[in-house]
Image (cartoon, grey):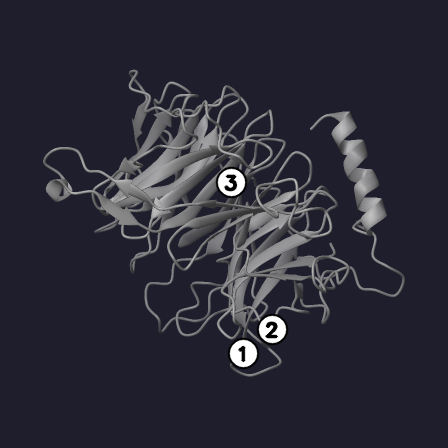
Amino acid sequence: MNIRHRVLLALAAAILGLTTAAPAGAATNELDTAWAHGGKLFGLGAVQLVDSHGRAVLARVLPDGAMRVTRLTFAGAPDPSFGTSGSVTLPLRSFVPPPGEGGGLPEVDALYPAGVSELPDGRLVVLGTSGNNVGFELVRLRPNGSTDPTFVGVGYNPVGEYVDNGGASALVTYPDGSALVAVNRFADQHWLQRFAPDGTLDTRPGSRIDVPNRPLCSVDGTPPLPRCYDGWSADINHLLLRPDGRIVVVLSNSDATMHSFVAQFLPSGALDTSFGPGGVAELPLGHAYGAVLSPSGDLFLSGVPSFPTPATPPAPVRVVDLTGTGRLRAAFGDHGVATAWNGLYRAPDGRRSADGGLALDASGRVVVAGTGLSTVDAGVQYCSVTRFTASGALDRSYSLDHDGTATDGRRNSSRCRGITVDAAGGYLVSAGTDDLPTTSLVERFRP
């Protein structure tokens, strides 16, 4: 972001009352009632990113299966300069299987948001994945929301990219407009697929990167390799790109073994053997729900520990800090791992205590969103945020009851979907709702 953009963001934040300083008498972790409708925005989906101009971009699947992308103003209203009244609707597409696969008949399916990435010129690349695991689609939008005619001639892949029994889960883009998509097929086939700047499939050597479905391991767990687990395989759930072009892939397994690991690849597609043991590092996480790269190059991940059965105790919120070489950073938390309990769990198995992912704010603090049970109202679920300091200590100042969590205003949210830090430092928490007419909710909280 250049200096001019930063100045404009600062001015806009000051005018709209979105500065990081809270009004006199207001707690810093309170719902920002000046944003959207009393601090809440219903029905527009989850926040996918905050663009270079500080505008939040949301996406959701509609009842008819189409996908809607919405851009907001600083004040939390749909941006009238984007699409129609702030939104663009991407209609259903046909996923046509190649000869010999899927019965040969086109399949029309709903598109679920799987990622949005911004190019340097402000264009957006949107990834939608099939709800029935038959493929995925890339769409490129111009800054005003119209489809980009230079992208496969019509702004999108006309028939989508067919994947038998599979779909896409993550997206990153390069400055030249090319894209890299994470693909999961069945339980043990995972790869990264490159697309050229014009949206066509990149068929050059190295354009497809096969991702191991388990880390390098040994039967007896002889260091430095982790122990092998029966049936250990995992899906790609996060994809990140380092400034030097190295690719970070986070995989998690959701069966009873609950294990996660990170693989790092060179720009050529080869495993980066300088990262972890042989390019793959096991994580002290049962499931990694969030991943973000810091400006210094550290990889922060959030999740829960491994709990193999529902009978085990509630899972805590856990944050892991990996250096650029895949080692735990000893100065963060307890030898690279920060943990908070705070009553954050979801009965009976506790696997969603950090299911909303994580974000880093401008002060280097780690904020984690997760679903839990209220410690005040018995049996009531809510979406709560835990904050850690830059050194991995629980930030007890970010709480109404000084236990390190902020619960104010989240009683209507029954499941977290994500957390993002906006241009003015506020926390945008995306959540699901079971007891409201709509199926999505975004709330803005002061930091």
Q: Which residue is mark 3?
A: 328
Whether residue 166 can be seen here: yes
- Give 247 or 273, whichever is nearer the viewer: 247
> Crowding at label 1, few (<14), some or many (≥20) Cα neighbours within 10 Å?
some
Distance from Cα at disc 1 to Cα at disc 3: 36 Å
In 3D space, how far apart are the residues under numbered discs 3 and 2 (Cα atoms)? Answer: 35 Å
Amino acid type assigned to the residue bearing label 3 in the image: Leu
Q: Which residue corresponds to the image point at 49% horizontal and 64% vertical from the top-left?
A: 439
69 horizontally vs 35: left or right: left
Q: Work out which quarter of the rendered image holds the C terminus and state it.
A: bottom right
Q: In the rendered view, tell whether residue 68 sits above or below residue 141.
A: below
From this viewpoint, which residue is outermost toward the right? 24
In what quadrant of the picture does the N terminus appear?
Answer: top right
In the image, taking residue 59 as reference, residue 71 lies left or right, namely right
Q: What is the x, y in percent for residue 174?
A: 49, 24
Local SS, label 2: loop
> Mark on residue 380?
1
Indicate whether 196 appears above or below 417. above
**Residue extending furthest bottom?**
378
- How far apart marks 1 and 2 lie (CA) works out to 8 Å
Q: Which sits in the foreground, 70 or 326?
A: 70
Badge count: 3
Q: Nearer the viewer, mark 3 or mark 2?
A: 2
Residue 398 lies, with reference to residue 116, above or below; the image says: below
Front-most of residues 167 and 187: 167
Query: Of the residues under marks 3 and 2, which one precedes in the sequence?
Result: 3
**Badge 2 is on which residue?**
411
Determine the residue located farthest toward the top in the rendered image.
Answer: 204
Q: Determine whether the residue tagged by mark 1 lies in a helix, strand or loop.
A: loop
At 35% from the left and 74% from the top, the residue drawn is 311
The kind of residue tagged 2 is: Arg
For mark 2, does the 10 Å Cα neighbourhood hold few (<14), some (14 to 19), or many (20 or more) residues?
some
